[in-house]
Amino acid sequence: MRLSPLRLMEKFIRNKDYIFKDPTWARKDFLRTGLTFIGIQIGLAVIIEEFAYPTPDIVYDLRCIGSPDFAAFAQDQKYGAFDPMVTNAIKSFKYSEGKVAEARRRATPNPYHESS
């Protein structure tokens, strides 16, 4: 350790001599500080656990709002209902797929089929 003006200051030398002469003081101070912070953290964890977590009825309401399938399950006690938006999307896709197939069939007649 190189000597520096900071380490040669009278205040530093007195504190160094005081701490290293009786290391139990430093240990006691460290333990007191550490246990204080651990106690504060445990206290905050208890407060968060008691007051910040939503109760089961709030969780149920949020799940009903966020998931229409869960709301249908909760109301009907079945495995869920059909979502009309998904059903309509599938129907419109099948309808447009049929229209495209019909347009393609009319555009390119089959030479092996007599009716075309």
Image: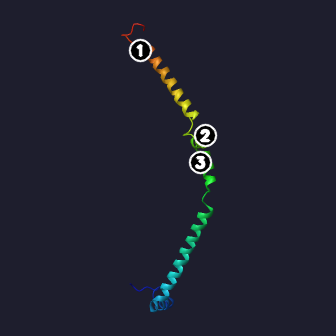
Total numbered labels = 3
Q: Nearer the viewer, residue 14 or 22?
A: 22
In the rendered image, residue 31, in percent from the top left (x then y), is placed at 50, 81
Q: Nearer the viewer, residue 104 or 44?
A: 44
Q: Residues within 10 Å of mark 2 (few under 14, many from 20)?
A: few
Residue drawn at point x = 58 percent, y = 63 percent? 49
Alpha carbons under labels 2 and 1: distance apart: 50 Å
Q: Residues within 10 Å of mark 1 (few under 14, many from 20)?
A: few
Task: Tell me the SS state at disc 1.
Answer: loop
Residue drawn at point x = 52 percent, y = 30 percent? 90
Residue drawn at point x = 57 percent, y = 41 percent? 69
Q: Residues within 10 Å of mark 3 (few under 14, many from 20)?
A: some
Residue assigned mark 3: 63
Alpha carbons under labels 2 and 3: distance apart: 15 Å
User: In terms of image quadrants, where is residue 83?
Assistant: top right
Residue type at mark 2 is Asp
Residue assigned mark 2: 76
Residue type at mark 3 is Arg
Residue assigned mark 1: 108
Relative horizontal placement of residue 18, taking residue 85 as reference (left or right): left
Quarter holding the N terminus is bottom left
In the rendered image, residue 58, in percent from the top left (x then y), is placed at 63, 53
Alpha carbons under labels 1 and 3: distance apart: 52 Å
Relative horizontal placement of residue 19, taking residue 70 as reference (left or right): left
Task: Tell me the SS state at disc 3.
Answer: helix
Residue type at mark 1 is Thr
Residue 8, compared with residue 115, is above or below; it is below
